[in-house]
Structures are given as C-alpha cells and as structure tokens.
Image (cartoon, grey):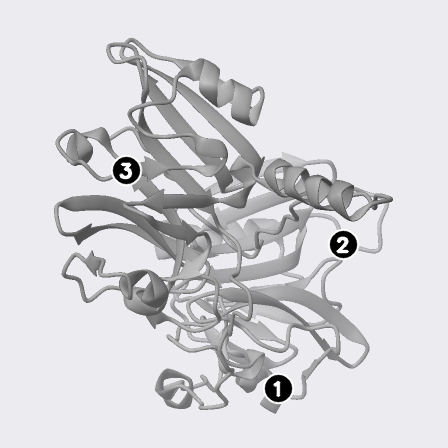
Amino acid sequence: MKKKRVVLLMGIMLSASVLMASAEEAGTEQSTLETETEAGAAEESWMDYSITIDGETYELPMMYAEFASYGWVLEETEDTLAPYRYSIYQCTKDDMTVTVYLLNLGINTVPVEDAILAGISIDRFYWDEVGAEVTLPCGITRGVSTLDDIVAAYGTPTDTYEGELYTQYTFEQDYNQEVELEVYKESGVLEEIRVENFIEPEDFDPGEVSTEVPSDILAYTKPDTLGSDVTAYEIEVDGEAYTLPVPVSVLLEDGWKLDEDSDTEIAAQYYGWVTLYKNNQFFSTTVVNEEDYATTPENCWLESLTVGGYTLDMDGALPGGVAIGTDEEAFLTILEDAGVSYESSESGNFRYYTYNAPSYGSSCEATVYIGTDSIFEKDTIIEVSCEHSFD
C-alpha cells in the first residue's frame, strides 16, 4: 500500500489550532438565522479531520475504545505502545476493513487498545466490492468526487503527486495533521483516503508518574575503583568510579544535586534532560528511563559522563591508567600495550581520540591539547569521557 510512514520522536510533541469562522450579528431574526446557517457550512473543512463510514461519523483524534464501541474489531494483537510512538493495524466491521493509526501520547506504556486512534485509511484493495458510503466534510465522497470536486471544496492542495495510476492530493495543516486523497485515473473519482490528526483528544489523561524504584536500579553495583581493563566502560569523576550506564540516584548519593530546571518526570522508555551540580560545578545531560512506566529522574540512567576540559573542572580518569594530565605518548603506549585500536581527529588546538567503540552508543574518548596558549598543558589529556548505551 502507498502509505506515508512517519516515526514520532519524540521529545517533540505535535500541536496546532484550527481557525474557525464565526457568524456576524445581523439586524433581524431572519437574517441572523441565515447568517448562522451559512457560517455553519463555511466552518466545515478538511481540517475537521472527520470521516463518515456507513452513516457513522468519526472525528479524529478519538480514543480507540470509542471507535471500537461502534463495532470495529482490531486485528488480534498483544502489542503495547511506548509513549510518543504509533503503530498501524487493521480493523474490521462486517465486510469493511480500515487501516488505523494507534498513537500513545501518554507517559506510560499502554496496550494498543488503550491508545489514541489518530488516523484512518481507506484502501481501494479492501473497498472495491464494499457498498458502504464513505464521505468527508463538504460532501467529498469516495467513488463519486473528482479532482475538480476536491479542489472546489478544499482549495489548492499543499502537495500534489502525479502517479501513473492515480493523482494524490495532500492537504497538510501541520506535522502528522493532514488529509491525503487519491483519485485513480481509470475511474476518475476518489478511491483512497487517509485522515491523520496526531494530537491529544479533549480531556486526555496522560497517566501518572510512579515513584517505584526499578529493580535494575536497586541491583546496580558501584565499583570501588577503576579497573585495569582499558575496554571497560568505566569512568572516574571527582574520585568516584562508575560503571556505565549509571543510575542518577548513585550520583546523588555521591553528593551531586539536581538543578531545579531539570525535568521532573521521564516518560516510559523515553529520555529527559537534567542538570547536576556539585561544588559549584554543573553539567547538563540526557537521562534514560528503561521502564514501562513514567518515573522521576532519580530512577533513570546516565549513559555517558564527561569530565575535564571546559565541561567539569574536576579530576577524571578512564580504566587502564588513562587520566586527565596523562602525556599523549604515554596514553598511546597504554592503548598499544592493550592491543586497542583507536581513531583520531584534530580541530583547532585539540586532538581527539576515540577507542573501545564497537557500535554506536558505546565508546571511550580522550581529548589532548596540542596548542601553546592556554591554561592546559600541551600534549596532555585534558578531558575524558565514556559512553555506554542500552541496546
């Protein structure tokens, strides 16, 4: 099927407003009634994000449970949806089949049946022999309306695609707020329809934040000191050693504090931003929630830490004797003796070394100052960092 697939990330949520026309006051009761009738007709547009199927009108977004109450049955699934993600399924009712876009804009992972129905698609493959009527605002009707009818009702489309078999009109208000219509050249009439409105329904309940401490957080063991294995994902910050990923709560136990500007809740299977400070030193970073429920930043994970340079004016080190202040030549000898390969690059007064990086999201890095006019000592490591992400 020719359907647009868009992945939501989301730390970024969708918002838009629909501008509605209003009736002007008139001097007589008769003229007022006529004006209100005209205004009601003028207000109807593709931006209503509604579709009428076999006499029932569905206004998007709506909760899937409401849609199901009309007799639609979701294909068999035990899927769940993490926050800010959507999936595509099929629903049937009698001899009708529609494709639905189920979206989770809450903060907890939910069964798909508890998601928002944010899109409906009518595909000609399932509807060629179906007699049910499908209409859109302004009287646009599947199997009847032409390209000229659509333009007359909705105006010039945002985008037009001319294919060999069909012409596709897209009317877009915002990201994932659009109506897509396909008129096939053989029939000359509207055959395929997709309506999407990826926003929260009215009175939407996003869910609650749990204060339960995840078992993996409780099971984390903090190393006493850095080990000798150069390939270990460990880092020492201000005299404290950490294996990454590290719970935020462990840093709080070591004297770090959360700045008031930090996110106070992190959605399930998602990330947020925090600022940590200690001894007048600050750094901001992302934290990851690995649970299926929303939680506080204390119960999330730091996947990377950086110390030294212009980030944190503190002592820092990586396993195997790689530390701030280590001579560049001695550092390279450590890597060579351990049989560890590396990549290097230069920019301005700095040379950057990356090693222990088998895949994206995992690496160790050391920054060497190669300039001559700075508070940093030339040809020595001035900053170290370690990153180790969850798979």
The disc, 3 or 1, on the residue closer to the chain's N-terminal end is: 3
Q: Is residue 391 visible?
A: no
The disc, 2 or 1, on the residue closer to the chain's N-terminal end is: 1
Q: Position of residue 39 (x, y in %)?
A: 68, 40
Q: Does residue 99 sit above or below 152 in this rendering?
A: below
Disc 3 or disc 2, which is closer to the eye? 3
Q: What amino acid does circle 1 point to?
A: Leu
Q: Which residue is mark 2?
A: 377
Q: Does residue 357 sit above or below 391 in this rendering?
A: above
Q: Secondary structure at mark 2?
A: loop
Q: Does residue 213 sit above or below 76 in this rendering?
A: below
Disc 2 or disc 1, which is closer to the eye? 1
Asked whether disc 3 touches disc 2, contact meaning CB atoms under 8 Å apart, the reply is no
Give the side of residue 299 with respect to residue 27, left or right.
left
Q: Which residue is mark 3?
A: 133
Q: Position of residue 18 (x, y in %)?
A: 65, 46
Q: What amino acid does circle 3 point to?
A: Glu
Q: Secondary structure at mark 3?
A: loop
Which residue appears at 48% of the width and 38% of the height?
A: 137
Q: Quadrant of residue 169?
A: top left
Q: What amino acid does circle 2 point to?
A: Glu
Q: Is residue 211 visible?
A: yes
Q: Which residue is mark 1?
A: 252
The disc, 3 or 2, on the residue closer to the chain's N-terminal end is: 3
Q: CA distance from mark 2 to mark 1?
A: 32 Å
| Camera-nearest residue between 36 and 365 | 36
Which residue appears at 18% of the width and 45% of the height?
A: 96
Q: Secondary structure at mark 1?
A: helix
